[in-house]
Every structure is written in C-alpha cells, then in structure tokens.
Image (cartoon, grey):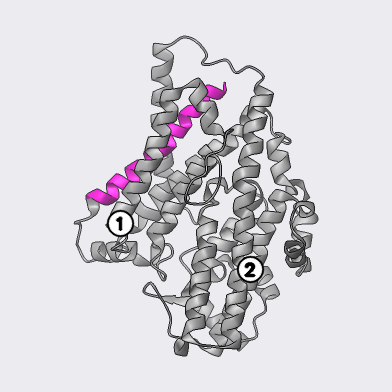
Amino acid sequence: MKKYLLKCMFTLAVLFMAVNFTSCSDDDDDDDGPVVDNKDEVYGNILKSYVNTTVIPTYKTLAEAALEMRAANQALRENATDANMAAAAAAWIKARIQWELSEAFLFGPVSEDHLNIDAHIDSWPLELEEIKKEIGLTEGQLTGERAWKELEDEVIGFHVTEYLLYREGKSRPVAELTEGELNYLTAATDALVWDCVLAYVAWAGEENVSAAIKEVYRENADIISFLESENASIKNFGSKLSSADSYSSWESAVEEIIDGVIDIADEVGATKIADPYSNGRVEDVESWYSWHSLDDYTNNIYSIRNAYLGGEGTAGSPTSVSLSTFVKENDAALDTEIKEKIDNCIKKIQAIGDNGSLSFYKVVEAKSKGDTSRQAIVNEAVDACLAVGVSFGKIKELLK
C-alpha cells in the first residue's frame, strides 16, 4: 500500500501511548512480568496455529477466489453480456474480501523486502492516464506475462480490474466495455492470479498445495524464477515462521504477528480513513469504483481478529491455541480489552457509512464540498484503530 505522512504521525502516536503504558506499569510493579514456562513450546504452538489455521487457509481461499475471478472474466470475454459482467464484478468482490482478510500479515513473502506482492496487487490511487495510454498503445494485445513483469504497480492489480468492472458501486453496462479494456482486464487478471497463487505457494510450500494450484504457479516461468531463484530464502515461509527459523528468538517471531496487526490498524486509521477524509480527496479512497471501501477496512480488522483469536474468514472461528489464549492466561484483563477494542473498531468503521447505507466515497465527496456532519464519526473510527494498535503493543510486555 502507499503510505502517507499522516501514517507516520499515527505510528508515533501508537508508540507514544505504548511507552506511557509501559512506564506506568514499571512504576506500579517492579517485577519483569509473567514467567512463561517452556516458552519455546508455548510460542511454537502459537506460531504453528497462526500459520496453519489463519495465514495459509486465508491465502488458499484467496488463490481459489482469484481463479474464480479469472474464469468469470473469461466467460465475459467469450460472451459479453450484462449478466456475465455482473458475475465478473461479483467474483472480484469475492477475491477482494480474501485479500483484505490477509492484511494483518503483510510481512514475509508479500512485503516489499521480498516478493512485493502487496504493492503489486493493491497500489492506489491508480494512474488512469497511464492505463488508458497502455490500452491504446497495445491495441488490445497486452498479455498477462507482460502485465506482471513490466507494468508499474499503479496500473495493475485489484484496483485496475475494479476500475474496468465497476462504476459508482455497480457493475458497468457491458456495452461500455471496449475490446481494448476487455483485453486489459484479462491480462491484469492473469497477473493478479499469479500474485495470489505466489503468495500462497510462498507461505505453504509448493509441495503442500493442490495439483491445480501447482499448475497455475508453473504457468509463468518468471513467477517460478522470482520465488525459487531471486527469493529462495522465503520459500515455505510458514514453516520458517512457525519454527522461528531466521528469527533471533521465539519472542521476535511472535512479535512479527503483533507488528503485522499494529501496521494494518495504523494503515486503516491513518491512511485509508483519515487521509482521504481530511483532504477531501475522493481519488484517495481505496476501492471507490465499487464503493466497497468500508467493507475493505472492516475486513482488515477481521484479519486482526483472526490473527489474534485464530481461524479465518469474516464469521470468526477461534482456535484452542492462539495469541489470545496466551494473553488470557497471562493477563485476562488485557485479553478482554483487546477483544473489546477489535469489536468496537469494527462498529466504528461501519458507522461511518451508517452501517451500509452510505459509501465512504460519498462521505469524502460530501466533505470536499464542505459537509463535515460525519467528522465526529470518522474521528471515532480513526481513534478506534489507534486503540487497537496500542492494546496489541502491550502484548510485547508479556513475552519478556
């Protein structure tokens, strides 16, 4: 994701509040916190559960949803009807949900330090003029291979496919879609599929995915080389994380989970909500063609909940071993606090759009015209994101 100055300010606020909490704790209690017996085993079990019940299942479902999106777009290409356009748009939403549910763990393979999938798949705002130029230059001949290897982040990924499929929260009339746009959609979707599959394979290991996924992974030689030659150190990353391989300690491996949560809580509050609203810039609203923005942000918080409680999806499926079970055993009040902060954050984000009746695009558009009637509600959501990050920061004291 693109980061802005406000995000840095938000991060400093998280750190300031976390430091104040630590200082108060030190004043009130001279001990070094709870003693964790057999911490290698305890932390190892947390990491294994996190990888096997949350991260890998989420990426598996994402890869499968991306393939459904590809099939829907192929059906649209073969038979350009409004019904097939609507089906392709719905498939986009399904894949989009799974990506947003993965954003609490944007480290390791998907990070800019390695495969850079996050930026490749989810940069915004789009460079619309470049997209239009590319459509004209290639005369409808852009391939998925070239899109993945050569095009800039701001002209591929989820948001260009969204732009081609949606207008004002609805699927476009198929009559509006040109042949060049349809070809661009096909190529960009192939690139998106490969990125989703690449994330799954990198975390799970090629030997642990289905034959169908292996086949897609091996469609593009550049994808294989990118992981196996250029980024071999993060192959089968789930196994490396769950065994704390390449980490200085078990604690630092568990802290990776915590930092992933703090990062996305920060981004949702500062970058995704506060930044476009404060500036009144609708073009900075993520997923504004589909009007799916507030659901995106809510799904990011669900990803935090899954990272903490275990399980996947939006319905919630807590596991018997998780970061939450560790916190509850060592500080039951903090466990309750974190769960309440997560639930409150979800409610506050949904309240921005009056629980589904108003898109964030419209909220920001109104602000750009001087309507500040939802300012307090937006502020509450931003504060709720900050609060989640601060509470998670306290967990680090329990690991010492």
Range shown magenta: 376-400
Task: Give the total number of marks visible in the rendering.
Answer: 2
Which image quarter: residue 145? bottom right
Residue 233 percent coordinates (x, y): 76, 46
Give the answer, above or below, for where 303 lies relative to 146. above
Residue 203 visible in image: yes
Q: Main secondary structure of the magenta part?
A: helix
x and y percent of residue 345 in the render?
36, 44
Q: Residue at x 74, y 47 (%)?
A: 236
Query: Which structural element holds mark 2?
Result: helix
Residue at horizontal 53%, vertical 66%? 158
Q: Residues within 10 Å of mark 2 (few under 14, many from 20)?
A: many
**Upstream in the sequence, badge 1 or badge 2?**
2
Near-viewer residue (171 or 191): 171
Q: Is residue 111 visible in this depiction of the protein?
A: no
Name which residue lies at 23% across and 55% down. 374
The amino acid beneath tag 1 is: Asn
Task: For the C terminus, give its image quadrant.
Answer: top right
Mark 1 neighbour density, 10 Å: few (under 14) some (14–19) many (20 or more): some
User: Is residue 218 highlighted in magenta?
Assistant: no
Residue for badge 2: 67
Give the label on residue 355, or none.
1
Q: Is residue 41 left or right of residue 350?
A: right
Viewer-proximal residue among 79 and 281: 79
Residue placed most toward the observer, 49 or 130: 49
Disc 1 is placed on an element classified as loop
Name of the residue lying farthest toward the top: 30
